[in-house]
Amino acid sequence: MLPSHPRRPWWGAFMAVVSAGALVAVAGCAGAHSRPGADPAPSGVAGSDPAGAGALWPAQSGAASASPSASKAAPSGSPTIEPAATGGLLSQVHTAGRVEVSGNTMRYSWPGVYFEGRFRGTGVGIVLNDSGADYDVQIDGAGVATLVTPGKTTRWVNGLNNAQHTVRVVKRNDSPWSISEFGGFVAAPGGAILAAPPARSRQIEFIGDSLTVGYGNTSTSRSCPGDQVARSTDTDLSYGALAARRLAADYQINAISGKGLVRNYNGGDPGTDYRGSYDRALLSVAGDVWSLGSWRPQLVVVYLGTNDFSTAVHAGEPWTADTLVTAYRDAYTGFLQKLRNRYGAKTTIVAVGAGSFANYVQQVVQQRNAAGDGRVRYWALDGSGLDSSGCDYHFSTHDDRLIADRLGAYIGTLALAW
């Protein structure tokens, strides 16, 4: 049985909507540790900000972590773009995340959103506008820098071999109260941005809460004061991201810390729940609806219930302990039907059961199966061997790897339409 994952006292105010269209007030979760086991950074990799150099916004300085041998030299002159990449961001960048294209930028809110590109030359600039989230930067598959709340900036990786390279930028944390912006990649002088990498044929969507986000998973302590949660969350090392990459799949991590299917952690932010945000690309924009585009996952993994049941129902809440169970099961049934309507009969939906709510999830799946939907499957999360040593007793990176192993083995038994 998994622990109840206690959180800090302010968590009850998580995602409090202050007014229609207003930003959402939350405590942010982000991370700032390098990927364990990453290859050494290429010699001369830099996280410096040159003035201009093709940026969509003025370059600014800010916190960044890069190779100790990083060069601070800024490229000069005007970068060029290959003809194949002149059709806008979508021709230069591959992403599977929930993004909205707005002019020359992509806007987004969910954790783990990643952008992949290809370029030729000795360096690449990364155009961002984000004061709420942290990012990992990878060149040719190796982690080279972590950008901590970079703000409005173009960050550069320099000193590479003059050859063709891949670049990947990934949002490390959930920041549902803010809107993040990505403005594409810019080649260093003499280089060129190439056409975007192709989309992967496999797609997986992960739906959940802080355990799916990777909340505090790189922390060396369960106690995480101040901004330690923010600096020690790495969605790119969450069990979902790990499992998807092992399966060579594009993926979305559609998870919000503190949210439950019907009841948020400790009864906080009453009148809201995960379902009210699920359809959005921009979580702080009431009524926003994300356009699916080509997103048709063959597999959806749902892991919701920890926040609903990890604390006792308080006086004044609209449930008793018994009616909360009924509300949860009814909501789960409706949510599974929503997913079925959204993605069609060929998508397999895996409902994860754990701890005190495992039986409720299993009951819902059995009802779906009895009604003829054999592509809804139940998976019991095996908590043996988990140390829950992340912030506030959340999964650690050790746990995320173990869960990814177990989930991957289970996925291997499914007859998926890929």
Image: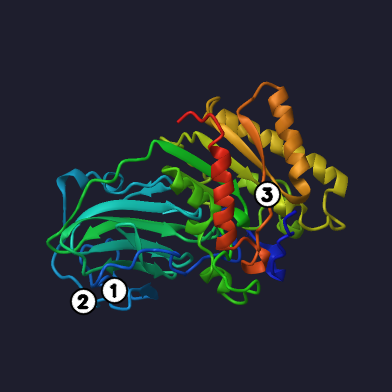
Three-letter amino acid code of the residue under disc 2: Ala
Quadrant in the picture for residue 126: bottom left
Mark nearest the camera among 2 and 3 is 3
Quadrant in the picture for residue 190: bottom left
Three-letter amino acid code of the residue under disc 3: Asp
Spot occupied by residue 205 in the image (x, y as percentages of width and height): 52, 42
Q: Is residue 312 visible?
A: yes
- Check disc 2 and report its element: helix, strand or loop: loop
Would you name the residue on which mark 1 appears? Answer: 48
Give the residue drawn at x 33%, y 51%. 116
Would you name the residue on which mark 2 appears? Answer: 73
**Along the line of sight, which residue is nearer the eye, 76 or 71?**
71
Give the residue drawn at x 57%, y 56%. 400
**Which of the two discs, 2 and 3, labels the residue nearer the N terminus?**
2
Q: Is residue 251 left or right of residue 187?
A: right
Mark nearest the camera among 3 and 1 is 3
Residue 382 badge? 3
- Badge 1 crowding class, 10 Å Cα cut-off, few under 14, some 14 to 19, many 20 or more, is many
- Badge 3 crowding class, 10 Å Cα cut-off, few under 14, some 14 to 19, many 20 or more, is some
**Which of the two discs, 1 and 2, labels the residue nearer the N terminus?**
1
- Check disc 3 and report its element: helix, strand or loop: loop
Quote the CA–CA distance across marks 1 and 2: 8 Å
Colour approach in the figure: rainbow
Q: Is residue 46 left or right of residue 271?
A: left
Quote the CA–CA distance across marks 2 and 3: 50 Å
Spot occupied by residue 257 in the image (x, y as percentages of width and height): 62, 57
Residue 13, compared with residue 360, is above or below; it is below
**Along the line of sight, which residue is nearer the eye, 51 or 103?**
51
Three-letter amino acid code of the residue under disc 1: Ser
